[in-house]
Image (cartoon, helix red, strand yellow):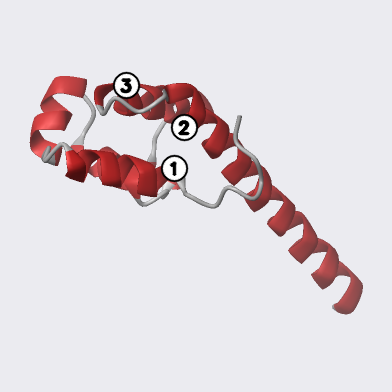
Amino acid sequence: MVTESDDISVGRILSDARKKKRLRYKKLSAELKIDEELLIALEKEDFEKIPGGEAYIKGFLRAYAKKLDVNPDEIIDRYTLFTERKSQGKKKLKQFFSYYCL
């Protein structure tokens, strides 16, 4: 289980694991059948570039993590925490603007 104080990001874990195994995007892409650009987007946490929404993002993260011998459940937990934090930040920003910009 990932705690909020655990600040290592999903993308960083995947990127570090890929580099440690000395794997290239082209090889991973062919083996996973996931476009290179999407693997890069996962590592950069640019999840908006992943087509198909939440289900595809989690599926790609899980497959990528397994391929890199990283615990896929930990990656999904970290992704969930990331999206919750992002959502809370957007909500606070919206509240701020609705209060001060009326």
Name the residue beneath numbered marker 2: 75
Amino acid under label 2? Ile
Secondary structure at numbered mark 2? helix
Which of disc 3 and disc 2 is earlier in sequence?
3
Residue 28 visible in the picture: yes
Asked if the residues shown at circle 1 and circle 2 are in contact, with their CB atoms under 8 angstroms apart, the answer is yes
Secondary structure at numbered mark 1? helix
Label 1 crowd (10 A; few <14 / some 14-19 / many >=20): many
Name the residue at 38% across, 46% down: 11
Residue 102 visible in the picture: no
Cα distance between the residues tagged 2 and 3: 10 Å
Asked if the residues shown at circle 2 and circle 3 are in contact, with their CB atoms under 8 angstroms apart, the answer is no
| Left or right: 92 in relation to 5 | right
Name the residue beneath numbered marker 1: 10
Amino acid under label 3? Lys
Name the residue beneath numbered marker 3: 66
- The N terminus sits in image quarter: top right
